[in-house]
Amino acid sequence: MAFRKLLNSKKLLSLFAMLTLFGTNVLMAAEAATAAATDEKPGVGLGPLYYVLLFFVLCLVVAVVGKIFRIYDLTQQIQGKKALNWNNIMGIGFLLFLILGLIGAYWEFTVQGAMILPEAASIHGVKTDEMFFITFGITVVVFVVTQILLFGFVFKYKHNAARKAYYYPHNNTIEKIWTIAPAIVLTVLVVFGFFTWQSITNSVNTKGDLNIEVTGHQFAWEIRYPGKDQVLGKSNFKLVSGANKVGVNFKDKNSFDDITADTIVIPVRKTIRLNIHAQDVIHSVYMPHFRVQLNAVPGLPTFFKFTPTITTKEMQTKLDDPKFQYLLYCNKICGGGHYNMQKIVRVVTEAEYQQWISQQKPYLSDQLKKDLKFAETNEPKKESENSRLALNN
């Protein structure tokens, strides 16, 4: 009773009205402030609070309409007239809900469905998309059919005083059909997905792969390429310092020619192995156009192999967008600067890649040499080398 009184109280209605007004004002003020900072025309903000308040207002409207119908029904009864048939009203309500729901689903497909990612830019991405669209197609068909049957049956078989409902408690055949059929479909999808995922992840490091190290920390990605020996030097988190950001171990001779880069550049149609590390919290390497995503976990090195198939220029032409760029994101909410944890990824031809890699800086910078107490030796130079580095400790 107390709860009913609360719902019927004018104070609650006044509170909802005040919250709606307050929320709208706050959102409009925030939008105006943002617009002032960016010299844009202010508009009405549509944040989460706005939609929550809009939902409450919609509930109030439904409650008010229900009260109006109830008052009308009581008035009819007092006047000795025929009362409202609430079963018909509820049946029509369910039918309207079905129609509006199908219109909403159609809008989702046509408007928001147009925002889907373009074709996969990697070999395994094509397989991933096939698996997604098969599963999605089956579930959409099941969803539409079941919703039409659910709400259609409520409307068609609503209560009618002229007929009596048929008592039909159980049917073994029907039970078997709607248990076995979904089980078969789901089993096929799971097995198909298992073998697809196994073919994507069951890979080893083979000769000719381009090894790239990606290390995540709050809030940036550090990129390291191998040098001419095509072998990445070892690293150790205990060696991380201001100059040695990923803790490269220079006791490993393969580390001396490693390269650092601000942009990830990869040659098209060549197998890329991303060696993934994290230094503080869990991050996630996410490159949506290549259908690549794998967590970067502190203390647990992981890797992911893929082969890009569409260069950046080709994708710009396909999308008719000269500003398009592939991007590496962090797909874990890793802190306050998570939104800015991005790297540009460029897919180029082999010739363009070789030209780019030749212009990159060595990881072993002058500052790092100084920190590690490296110095040039006075030993005679050999014909095959210009200088030699020695460790002075």
Image (cartoon, rainbow, N blue to C red):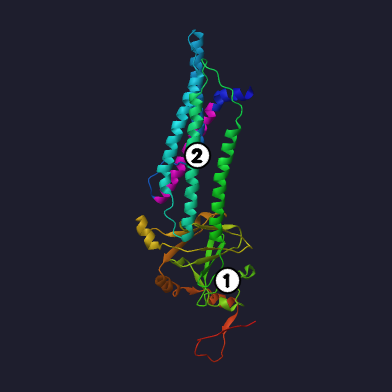
**Residue 165 drawn at (x, y percent):** 55, 20
Identified at 51% across, 10% down, the residue is 77
Whole-angstrom CA distance, mark 1 to mark 2, is 55 Å
**Residue 257 drawn at (x, y percent):** 53, 77
**Residue 131 drawn at (x, y percent):** 50, 51
Nearer to us of marks 1 and 2 is: 2
Q: Which residue is mark 2?
A: 142
- 220 vs 350, left or right, is right
Q: Considering the numbered disc 1 on the image, is that residue within a helix, a strand or a loop?
A: loop
The amino acid on which the numbered mark 2 sits, given as a three-letter code, is Val
What's drawn in magenta, residue-wise?
Answer: 13-38
Q: Which residue is mark 1?
A: 244
Camera-side residue: 176 or 79?
176
Identified at 58% across, 34% down, the residue is 173
10 Å crowding of disc 2: few (<14), some (14-19), many (20+): few
Residue 61: tell me if it is visible: no
Camera-side residue: 352 or 91?
91
- 309 vs 332, left or right, is left
Q: Considering the numbered disc 2 on the image, is that residue within a helix, a strand or a loop?
A: helix
Q: Earlier in the sequence, mark 1 or mark 2?
A: 2
Residue 133: tell me if it is visible: yes
Camera-side residue: 162 or 221?
162
